[in-house]
Amino acid sequence: SRHIVETFQAAGVAAEHIDYRMDDEERAAILKSFASGATTVLSNCALLSEGWDCPTAEVMLLARPTRSLIRYIQMVGRVLRPAPGKERALLIDHSGSTARLGHPCDDLPLTLDDGKPRVSGSKSTERRESLPTKCAKCSLMKPAKVHECPACGFAPERQNKVETIDGTLVKQSRKKPVTKVVKQHVFSQLLFLQQKRSYRRGWAANQYRSFFDVWPKGLAEVAATPTQEVINKVQANAIAFAKRKEAGHAAA
């Protein structure tokens, strides 16, 4: 975040960094400066992902990659608030999250929690006790979770380990939602191939999953003559499977 701010400032853009180590007054002043327009760029790491509201914000630069759909929607939601005179929001994604997770205004998958309680003591809930750490400057053993050394006042800064590469930004077109009619048609074509080639039951469902990333729930098992597009996709899947199998044999 600091590196991004320094780069904008070097280009003459009014930019500020904000983090949790700042006191309340300092953070409030930075947020006020951004809300008033005095600061053009406000950079942070996970601090303003949720719970912060500035409807006039119109542009978001997403520099942090994530595979979490919920976190992605929360982050992009900062610039999706309506405001007087605001007609659109612009997302400039340097992280590839949009390509992985889709357009932020697409319908969310309707998958509910199964209601099963988490097992106490599992790896996901068990946390190790924090231990004292040695100050890098005076070697005092600082108490756990104390950032600034109480003896010499040294506060270590996290080193930037972010690797960057040159790239070209391209416009991400919003994908149209696939209707159930289309899904049924594809599944019916796969059933035709399964029957004609005497494949095992379940082959069509696995192929269907390669098309839509979900199983064919609620679809009728009615066969239909396949199109060349579906045949090409099935052939591509077979080639990819053969290559993975060959690579596995070579590794063994």
Image: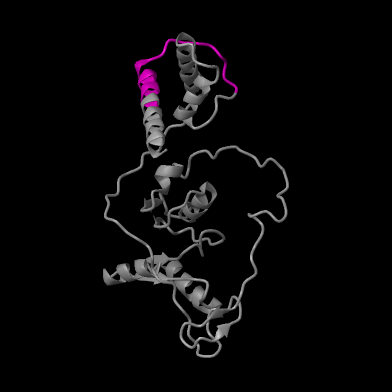
Residue 39 drawn at (x, y percent) = 38, 69
The residue closer to the viewer here, 114 or 125, is: 125
- Residue at image coords 59%, 78%: 132
Residue 209 drawn at (x, y percent) = 49, 28
Instruction: Decide whether residue 250 is among the magenta residues.
Output: no
Q: Is 201 on the left or on the right of 94, as rendered?
A: right
User: In this picture, which residue range is highlighted in magenta?
Assistant: 218-237
For the N terminus, the quadrant is bottom left
Q: Residue furthest bottom?
A: 151
Q: Quadrant of residue 220?
A: top right
Q: Is residue 38 visible?
A: no
Q: How is the image coloured?
A: one colour
For the C terminus, the quadrant is top left
Q: Residue furthest front?
A: 252
The residue closer to the viewer here, 15 or 32, is: 15
Position of residue 179 relative to residue 54, above or below, is above
Residue 151 drawn at (x, y percent) = 54, 90
Residue 72 drawn at (x, y percent) = 49, 51
Q: Is residue 115 visible?
A: yes
Position of residue 104 relative to residue 181, above or below, is below
Q: Quadrant of residue 249?
A: top left
Q: Is 149 on the left or on the right of 15, as rendered?
A: right
